[in-house]
Image (cartoon, rainbow, N blue to C red):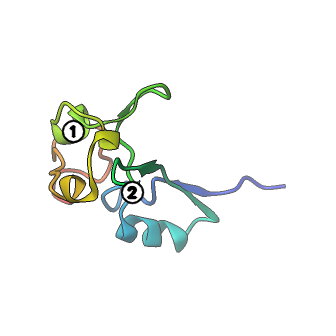
Amino acid sequence: TRPRIVGHRGSLYQSLENTRHSIRLAANHCEEVEIDVFLLKCGTLIVFHGGGTDQNPGCLKDYCNVDKSILDLTYEEARQLKFSPHYAEFGCGPDVI
């Protein structure tokens, strides 16, 4: 059997990770797409990666320069987040963000 091609957080070197655009790009070239889904405090599901650990997931410090977890936000609060364009983990580069 041959290895399966999986888009990790979408196509993160071409588009901002975990966005519809990134997932669609990955779907054109991959057999599967891996994403992270969180439940916000208002009960809304959101696709997001963030930092942290399995015990303390969704940290926004590196991604958005906010000292909170995505789990502590409502949908409206999450929509106001701005990504830090120079965070080294963003494979697509600051011009895309």
Is residue 97 among what the camera can see?
Answer: no
Quadrant containing the C terminus is: bottom left
Give left or right: position of 24 versus 81: right
Mark 2 sits on what residue? 46
Q: Nearer the viewer, mark 1 or mark 2?
A: 2
The percent coordinates of residue 88 (x first, y second) are: 25, 37
Q: Secondary structure at mark 2?
A: strand
Q: Secondary structure at mark 1?
A: loop
The residue at the point 33 percent across, 48 percent down is: 91
Q: Identify the image quadrant of residue 34.
A: bottom right
Mark 1 sits on what residue? 87
In the foreground, 94 or 51: 51
Question: What is the spatial separation of the Cα atoms under label 1 and label 2, in whole angstroms?
Answer: 21 Å
Is residue 95 among what the camera can see?
Answer: yes
In the foreground, 59 or 72: 72
The residue at the point 21 percent across, 59 percent down is: 76
Q: Which mark is residue 41?
A: none
**Residue sticking out furthest to the right:** 1
Q: Are marks 1 and 2 in contact (CB under 8 Å)?
A: no
Q: Amino acid at mark 1?
A: Tyr
Q: 10 Å neighbourhood of mark 1: few (<14), some, or many (≥20)? A: some
User: Is 59 rendered above or below residue 74?
Assistant: above
Q: Earlier in the sequence, mark 1 or mark 2?
A: 2
In the foreground, 67 or 5: 67
